[in-house]
Image (cartoon, grey):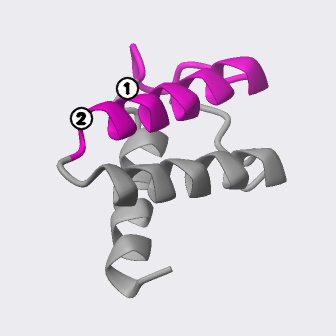
Amino acid sequence: MGKDLKRWIAAAVIAVATGAHAQALDEALDAPTRAHVVNEYARRLTAQHVDPARAKEAADDIRRRLARGEYDQQTTA
């Protein structure tokens, strides 16, 4: 995976983790809600990104990270 793509993914994850898609700050974020936020972000990324191949690669990576538990430490939004 390219360095630029990794940076982009990191920025996207930070946006999600800091509540860009959450309803309120410091709202409890359980596993099903966290999975929904990450999957919805990946879905929108795939649907709206200018480069479909890169979008799919990034979305797949985000979902793999979710499956590995890399976002489990995010417990508030």
Residue flagged by tag 1: what amino acid is it?
Answer: His
In the picture as drawn, the residue positioned furthest to the right comes out as 68
Give me the residue at 36% from left, 60% from top.
54
Magenta stretch, residue numbers:
22-49
Q: Earlier in the sequence, mark 2 or mark 1?
A: 1
In the picture as drawn, the residue positioned furthest to the bottom comes out as 3
Q: Position of residue 36 (x, y in %)?
A: 60, 21
SS at badge 1 = loop
Q: Position of residue 47 (x, y in %)?
A: 32, 31
> Foreground residue, 51 or 63?
51
SS at badge 2 = helix
In the rendered structure, find residue 48 and report the number of the disc placed on it: 2
Q: Is residue 47 left or right of residue 64?
A: left
Give the main secondary structure of the magenta stretch: helix
Residue 32: image quadrant is: top right
Give me the residue at 17% from left, 49% from top.
50
Give me the residue at 72% from left, 48% from top.
73
- Residue 30 sits above or below residue 13 on the image: above
Residue 48 visible somewhere in the drawing: yes
* Residue hosting label 1: 21
Q: Position of residue 35 (x, y in %)?
A: 67, 28
Mark 2 vs 1: CB contact within 8 A: no
Give me the residue at 48% from left, 25% from top.
40
